[in-house]
Image (cartoon, helix red, strand yellow):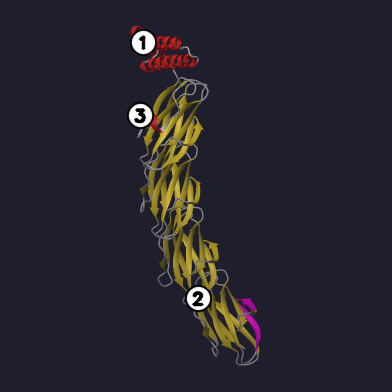
Amino acid sequence: MFDNIGMIGIVILILITGGAIATQLYEKRSIKAALIAVVSTILLSILSTIIYNAIEPILSGVESDSSSNSGIIAENGDEKANDVNLPEPSPTAENHAASSNENDITGKTSISGAIVNEGQINTYCFTTQTGGTYRFDVDLSAGVDVRVRISGENGSSINYGTNALTIDLEEGKTYLLGIEYMNGACDYNVSIGIPSEITDITGSTLIEGNIVYQDQINKYQYTASVSGTYRMDADVSAGGEVRLRISGENENSINYATNGLTIDLEKGKTYILSVEYVNGPCDYAVAIGVPIPITDVEGNGPIYGSITYQDQKDKYRYTAPVSGTYRLDTDLSSGGEIRLRISGENENSINYGTNGLTIDLEKGETYIISAEYINGTCDYLISIGVPIEITDISGNTSVSGSITYQDQKDRYLYTAPISGTYCFNTNLSAGGEVRVRVSGENEKSLNYGTNELTVDLEAGKTYILSVEYTNTSCTYTLSIGY
């Protein structure tokens, strides 16, 4: 209704109107009528004020009652609104802060709840205690689905999946887990797979653990004690299968394989060994095969060692004392078989053979002898057949020696005193057999025969006379006639 200011405005309007009428009458020389108009205007203003003062309290009471009734209606309206079940709003930083204590699931491995309304989102807060791969699996009432969502602390979505989610999370950060309505009401149970902390296993040859959830990755830190070929073999419980992975310290993958992995590592470098879920939960024991440090062969051996794991390579450094044909032979325990390899000092392979190897080496050069796994564990002994120094037998009519290893070649320098036909005959121990060969000074073969040889030589020329292994060890005496 009107307030005091409104009433004053009406009075002023009456006065102005009356004054205007009186002015017109005065201009028409109707002085009496003008006086009457002025007096009437004043009386009308006074009367309006009296009437307003009389009815104002009544009007104020009605207004007050009306306001009270409006408040009651609004209150009743709120109560009625509170009886309506509305869907929960999408998670925000504000409503998370209000409910963070109630819905904090940090450290829990399972939670339960219910979706009852379309559009409903149940939000949980948690802070990671370890970094790594997490897994959220939802067990639901029949015939419905939910969306599993991980968001940052500010509510921004990071990733989501239907009924399950695998996601990498950072240590010490706070995240929101949302269980969201998709196609029906349901009860749910969420299993939370939490990765274990990375542990240092340097120096260990066996690690044990278990895989309990899909996409689980157990990580171990390992510093190689020696450069060489390592082997990781996983023994898993029935039905289990794991992936073994080696990564650099920066976690960039180098190589991986299922249940077993062979890989070359460098001494002093740190790597990450991961045991990863493939197709089922299981217990595991991972054996780590560590190569022996490379060692120098003392003299001409023999070399003793053991092959204990798949793809093992034992390496030995050897400097040839003389140029010529060498033979590496192995004596192995039952069921064993190994590859013998000769490489240069730069470890580039020169030649190899199974259980034995014949090879020409140069005096003073250093080589790497490798004993390598083929198909079984075993103990081994490697004997090294070393050739004799080439000697000059010019002027001699005979020379004696021994053949002691396969593919041995005893070589002698011989300068023919005259031109003509020469006969080289051998006297051998029982069962012995040798090859007699004559080559030019450039070592190109001119002729050869078994146990004896007839050949034409030129006076003054120097030849190489060889007595070579054929089929067994023996002693010999070589006679020279012309």
Residue 335 in sight: no
Q: Is residue 176 visible?
A: yes
Label number found at residue 98: 3
Looking at the picture, how far across and down is residue 451, in whole percent? 60, 76
Three-letter code for the amino acid on which mark 1 is drawn:
Ile
Amino acid identity at mark 2: Pro
- Residue 328 highlighted magenta (yes or no): no
Could you say which is closer to the camera, residue 33 or residue 210? 33
Comes first in the chain, label 3 or label 1: 1
Give the left or right position of residue 371, taking residue 471 as reference: left
Disc 3 from disc 1: Cα separation: 63 Å
The front one of 250 and 456 is 250
Which quadrant is home to the C terminus? Answer: bottom right
Residue at horizontal 43 percent and vertical 67 percent from the top = 302
* Quadrant (top left/top right/bottom left/bottom right) for the N terminus: top left
* Magenta segment boundaries in residue numbering: 447-457
Please tell me the numbered disc located at residue 46. 1
At numbered mark 3, what does the secondary structure look like: helix, strand or loop?
Answer: helix
Nearest the viewer among 165 and 122 is 122
Dot 2 crowding, Cα within 10 Å, few <14, some 14–19, many 20+ = many
Within 10 Å of disc 1 (Cα), the crowding (few <14, some 14-19, many 20+) is: few
In the figure, is residue 5 to the left or right of 331?
left
Location of mark 2 (residue): 387
Secondary structure that dominates the magenta span: strand
| Mark 2 secondary-structure assignment | loop
Kind of residue at disc 3? Ala
Q: Closer to the camera: disc 3 or disc 2? A: 3
